[in-house]
Amino acid sequence: MTASEPIPPTAPAPSAPATSAAGALPDEPEGSPVLGRGPKDFDVGVPVGPTPAADFWAAVYARRSIRKFKDDPVPRELVEQVMHAGIWAPSSCNYQMWDLVAVDDPEVNARLAALSTQMGNAPVNIVVSYGREFSEESWANIQSASALIQNMSLAAQVLGLGTFWITQTGDREKVREVVGLPYDRLVIAVLAVGYPKFWPKGGPKRRPLSAVSHWNHYGGRPIPSSADPKDWHPDDVAIYQRARVLNGLRHNKPRAWEKRALERALGELLPPQGDSETPTGRWLDVLPCTGILTEAMWQARRSYQFDVVERTPEVAEFVGERVRPRASLYAWPDAQPERNFGPPPPESFDVVSLLFRLEGLHPEARAGLLAEAARWLKPDGTLLLGFVSKRSYHDTTERLRARRGGPRGVEYVLSPDPNIGPFESLAPKDVERWAAAAGLRVDARVGCQAVPQPEELAFRTRNFAPRAKRLAKGVASALSALERLPGIEARYGRFQFWRLRRQNGK
């Protein structure tokens, strides 16, 4: 099977059950009081068109989310086959209170794309709705519709089509109005359908079954849904960040505004030493997680050999592959020696970077992390520290985000995709106190971005209604004038970068 072919046939398609002369189903006696019941009135599970037979397991393991589609139209016969497979999913009480609107009209799709850019990629968008108040206290409406969407996704895979399950639909009531659904239908999600521009060669790695399955009684410790670092055990952070890097590079890319802040800090605090790309110094990045910033620093400072210290081998290896030559990997010192996958870092680095990691630790552990990072410096080395300031706009925008009903899960400030770990902005006076306790002094400071940047604003409001987008853009434009006032960024910048040296060093 090539990457562009549907799943190969291995099993016959289902056939229609036999009916009596009167048209009743086999398990229903003739003369049923249900008027008019017969094969034309009730679906009996016969595919609505010719369908390739497929191995179930191949379909499950080969299915991928597709984000880039060809412009080629999808025949309605295939779309109907996909939807038909969907309606054979289980539904609560078998009430089947779903309604599907398949949109292949470019003008209607353009109106949907205006509500969410994710609905602007495929030639067909199937809007999935369910009874608004049906068993809402148990989420039976959402569960039933989700089962239908999974069936449709697998059917599309077998038919050689790609799908993308869209939950970020923007204003779902506007979606409902665009396609004419009545108010008592709740839009659950949209399934984008089309021919993929390319089939992914492989899917993201999965957490092992042994890490997520239990028999008879839960035997693990759940990953918190709170962003408060006090709710997280260090092992939780390690497990969660390991799961994060399993998504691969596609989900671990820098944002323009973050990279710009880092580039400015490097230019002012650690200017390049010549233009040689042959490493002459050593640089250790502490707990880089996804390695987004590690890669950016390596690209900007090729005269250093970049190395990594991390909590787990999976995360360390992921980051190590983002730089050249490949980073040496060191294990974060663990109180239980058997858990160390390698040696701790030596005390021999010219530069040690600790960027936006203090915020994710329990408050009582932050001074210790900074002290460990300082210990790996050469006597005349430099520690580059980055953190999000509590006196910036960060906390205010987080409160506003929560109030407007946006994503309420864990959200890491330097990676807007949710769920990379706990996070709490820091008071500069506390950071200075921890640095002093580690034997470090602040040699220079750079503050960046005292107001939200245009790219970040566009990203975070991409699924807002047009009016809300204009309002947010207007507020940000008015605030941008404040950022140009002398000293504002240094004091109120969201991103704070400090250059630290030993108190008795150069």
Image (cartoon, rainbow, N blue to C red):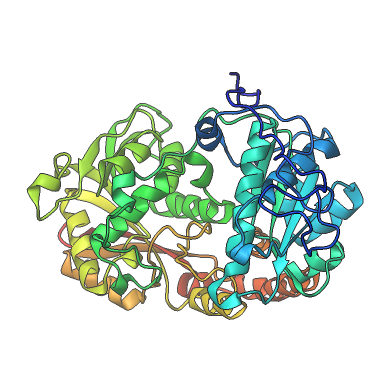
Q: How many circles with numbers are drawn on the protein?
A: 0
- Based on the displayed image, in which of its 4 quarters is residue 268 positioned? bottom left
In the rendered image, is residue 282 in sight? yes
Q: Residue at x 72, y 30 (%)?
A: 51
Q: Which residue is drawn at 50% across and 60% down?
A: 418
**Foreground of the two, 4 or 321:** 4
**Foreground of the two, 114 or 325:** 114
Q: Position of residue 176 (x, y in %)?
A: 80, 66
* Image quarter of the N terminus: top right
Q: Where is residue 295 in the image (x, y as percent from the top left)?
A: 43, 41
**Foreground of the two, 292 or 411:** 411
- In the image, taking residue 355 as reference, residue 382 lies left or right, namely left
Q: In this view, does 477 lie above or below 356?
A: below
Q: Which residue is drawn at 17% across and 43% down?
A: 345
Q: Position of residue 166 (x, y in %)?
A: 66, 54
Q: Is residue 232 above or below residue 238?
A: below
- Based on the displayed image, in which of its 4 quarters is residue 456 positioned? bottom right
- In the image, taking residue 324 as reference, residue 112 lies left or right, namely right
- In the image, taking residue 82 as reference, residue 76 lies left or right, namely right
* Image quarter of the C terminus: bottom left
In the rendered image, is residue 506 in sight? no
**Foreground of the two, 313 or 58:** 58
Q: Position of residue 360 (x, y in %)?
A: 34, 65
